[in-house]
Image: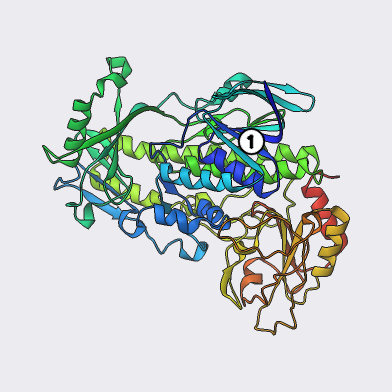
Amino acid sequence: MNELDVEVLVVGGGPVGLCAAIELARHGISVLLVERRTGTSIFPKARLITTRTMELLRGWGIQDEVERAGMPREEYLAVGVGSSLTAGDFVRSAAELDRDAPQSPTYTFLCAQDRLEVILRRLAESRPEADVWFGATMTGMRATAGGVTATVNRADGETLVRCRYLVAADGSRSGVREDLGIATEGPPPLGHMISIMFEADLGFLPPDRRAALSFLRDPPCAVEAVDHERRWMIQTGYEPELGGSPADFTEEACLEAVRAAVGVPGLPVTILGVMPWLQQAMVAAAFRAGPVFLAGDAAHVATPQGGFGMNCGIQDAHNLAWKLAAVLRGTAGEQLLDTYAAERRPIAARTVDESLNNALITFDMMEGRLSMREAIERQAGRRSCEGLVLGFGYDSCAVLPDGTPPPAPADPYRTYVPTARPGHRAPHVWLHGPGGRVSTLDLLGPRFTLLAPAGAGWPGPAGEAARLTGVSLTAVEISAVEISAVEISAVEISADDPPMPGESSPHGPGDPLTAVGRCPSGPLVSPTWAKEYGLGPEGAVLIRPDGHVAWRSPDGPASARALTKAIDLVLSRC
């Protein structure tokens, strides 16, 4: 039997597992990903990428590639309802594309999971820290004094894998979760579903009939656009209690269902695949068992309505990776890992609940409790969800409260209120620099970042804090007015992690554990950013590697002691 030692073993090669491997590798952690399938998904499954996930893809340098693989959002970021796609009662409501413009350098986008997985796999495999094994099944695991020992079987034989930590991203029917005896909480399955992927030329549909998702009543089903060319998918259901089963969906039955949904008898159609699945809304009772962590559908399953499931799982991976890296590198206490469940489980539970609320609108329409006009109005209103995907805040010992209350919008699902209150995602603000405009989010990376007004005096204390703590830290000063590059010249900082493909790194060469400096590309200017971050002339904000604010000093003075204490507390070092 072969033997292999890695720091983290990731089980599952879907989007969540691949993103976990990518982010761990960015932190310099050796990681092995194993996936029982021999290749990436052939089914589109998830298609909607939320604004927050697009921000992560932007940070990894693959936003443009994902957009090339996706659908034109101006045409398809819409929802429709009707008897069929060609029926006279069909109505459509497009998303408010300008609504999210001030909130991020990115936006909600549509890219089918099968295409996204190819891009993520290529990126994961490009990292020297990551090994990616498709066609590999974990057949056993046990906790040990040093972490986890797992047996992985693939075509060339068995491998004994020893790791410090294991991340289970193995889906809604997670074998790891079952082996650990972790229960799930939620209602019974909402429906036994069938996805029918097909190819057809629907180019005859006018623009007002094109939508990412259309709910139809005759027959009851949903039609999804997979690309803007020829691939589509129908989701319909069956009732086992009435004798229904996946076997009922023969090619002839599938062809009939597709033609009825489109409303064109005899439409030339090619059936590409049929996949049964359960529509569920559930959350695992625990997200951790010793050295094993659950992420994505292994930890929580949302209904498809809203497109939240994959995105919520990717945020799990992003939250967990930097914490595992900090503990593995000895810069954080083991207690930091307890904050993963403390932070992510409440967000997952809320996300699952909101997806259930979306599903209930569909059920009410299908069962005649809502007219199609009422249903489209409610569905359209729920398509805007930036409050849910951007506005959440963490509450754990990895966040140091500053006594300010959280935003309280009237509609916390739809409305995002930017805030740099500790625990919340650092707000996006456009800055102007020598190379053009750059987002505050573009300054963040796989390290802590300190943002402060120019002249506040924080770079020196930040350097001292980095030396005292041994923690990777980048300090960036931002001016309220145009000043010369001489007045805010760059300071060499340390970081030996190479940029991701297509990613420009603001860091110079050296030791990543004591990185400190300012943006070396020249001065950055914004007359409003300090106000938007709640900072006075001498204030500063410390942002975690996952982009959430860890600590805020509203108005200084600059202090190495205060910053060092904050870092120690956030990392469970005292």
**Quarter residue 501 falls in:** bottom right
Q: Amino acid at mark 1?
A: Leu
* Crowd tier of the residue under label 1, counting other residues whose Cα lies within 10 Å: few below 14, some 14–19, many 20 or above: many
* Residue with the most extreme left position: 265
Colour setup of the view: rainbow
Give the vertical position of 187 relative to 514 (above or below): above
Counting labels gives 1
Looking at the image, residue 255 sits to the left or right of residue 39; the answer is: left
Residue topped by disc 1 = 32
Q: Quadrant of the N terminus?
A: top right
Residue at (39, 52) in percent of width and height: 70
Please say if 256 is above or below 541.
above
Camera-nearest residue between 366 and 315: 315
| Residue 538 visible in rendering | yes
Q: Position of residue 239 (x, y in %)?
A: 30, 21
Tell me: residue 80, above or below residue 493: above
Front residue of this view, candidates 456 and 330: 330
Is residue 369 in view?
A: no
Q: Quadrant of residue 185?
A: top right
The image shows residue 236 at horizontal and vertical percentages of 29, 31
The C terminus - image quarter = top right
Q: Position of residue 372 (x, y in %)?
A: 24, 44
Helix, strand, or loop for circle 1? strand
Left or right: 465, with 522 as reference point: right
Q: Position of residue 111 (x, y in %)?
A: 41, 49
Q: Nearer the viewer, residue 35 or 543?
A: 35
Q: Nearer the viewer, residue 122 or 407?
A: 122
Residue drawn at the location 71% of the way across and 26% of the way down:
148
Q: Is residue 43 left or right of residue 222?
A: right
